[in-house]
Image (cartoon, grey):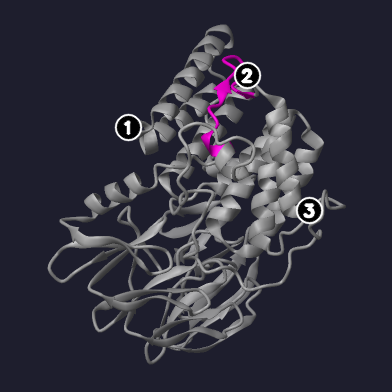
Amino acid sequence: MSAPPAAAVSAPPAEPVTAPPAQPGSPEVETTSQTVPERPAGPQGDPEQVLASYRWRLDPATLREVVEDPDEFRTIRRRLTEKLGTAVDNRSRARLLSLRAVVSRILGDQDEALADGRLALTYAEATGELRRTALAQARLAQVLRWRGEFAEADRLFTEATSPELPDRLRAALHEHAGRSCYDQGRLMEACHHFERALDLRGAGDADLLARIRVSLDAVAKRAGEAGFGPYPRSREELLERDRPPVPARDGDRWGFADLDGDMAIAAEYAEAQPFRDGVAWVRRPETGRWSLIDLAGATVVEPTYPTVRAFSDGLAWVSHHGAGGWLAIDPRGEVVVPPGFADVRPFRRGVAAVRREGWGAVDRTGRIVVPTRYHGFTTVLADGRYVDGFTDEGLAVVDVAGRRGVVDRTGQVIVPPAHPALVIHPVAFLVGTGAGRWGALDRRGGPLIDPVHRNRDEVVAEIERLLTDINPVL
């Protein structure tokens, strides 16, 4: 989490207010929902809509936005400051502060932009909303990029990117991450980002195509002068994570090898699982129980459990009985969630799906947050991926007698279990009928598209047509 500045830049308090997170179904002005004019609405319109509709011109050498009328942007910044004076919730503060950071960056006021960007991210993280946090991370990353603080900028771009975000936002993240790589002379990595942006949105976004064309021309010119630079970095490198040793076999025993292939932890185990959260499960030949070791190979938990699952979100499910009776421990071996579950799923962002008499969910203390009354958790995303339990956004598809609905991580029912098929889309819920027709609900569970389409792809295309009105403002 990025720390807030020592003092607030404007009226909002320096600490987020304590309040329940907004319903995940709430509309997101930043990424979708409002219709905007084809041309800039002028400084009196909603500041975000004005910025979203602005036709930015890129400097072909620096790949930075060029301001034609600074006074217009100063007017927008004043309006954002006025709105901040009456903003009372974390969502509004995060939005307004991060937008003001964008405007200050464009105007060249980098210190003000940095202070606003950091405070905005603090408020955004307090909401627990995936898209809002990603936008705040990206806007702060842009400020850092312009300041030449590339390590933190690249880390924030990487953290912000999630397959659960709308394609238009993911494309924008890759585009701007590519520009950051361009600034550093990492031209191969820049090209990878530009290519990913085109994969996500290129076919239907003429403005994106034009900007990428300018960017690739700049890359070609610089590569001709100084080459393409270093090879692209891995996600672990960008997140500044040390790569742990990986399980490796030596004869009939398992140990762990470093990046060079040398044994970092001696091969003395009958089985070994990969490191997660700095620890790994191993089983010695003389026992049927698993023990836990740290990165140095020291035993953290003696052979105790015959059945274990990998650590996720700082906790691991284990069982004394081979199956059932699951409990959760932390990396020190301390019991955090008492036993009592017949089946479990990994923790994600503080919650895990569990089965007792039915399926529900617990938080990291073992408190039941979703009643265990559902027949199943069957969370499917629009790209075809299955999720074990809850999405990063804190949503799960639940099943009652073959009918599916949606709950959030607090247990609130967003969509009652009434649909034969239901898939989570980044900005909607795709629902299928028993007759094989598909439609969509909005993120509040209300009707969005009638179930008259032959397949999910047709519904996704219709959603895209409804949402082609706003570009993410980064």
Dot 3 lies on which element? loop
Disc 2, SS:
loop
Report the disc number at residue 310. Answer: none
> Could you say whether the residue bearing mark 1 is in a helix, strand or loop?
helix
453 vs 227, nearest the viewer = 453
Q: CA distance from mark 1 to mark 3?
A: 39 Å
Q: Which residues are magenta?
A: 51-66
| Quadrant including the N terminus | bottom right
- Mark earlier in primary sequence (2, 3): 3
Image point (87%, 52%), residue name: 7
Alpha-carbon span between mark 1 and mark 2: 25 Å
Q: Position of residue 45 (x, y in %)?
A: 59, 42
Q: Name the residue that disc number 1 marks.
A: 203
Closer to the camera in the image, 33 or 348: 33
Q: Determine if the magenta segment contains residue 266.
A: no
Earlier residue among tags 1 and 2: 2
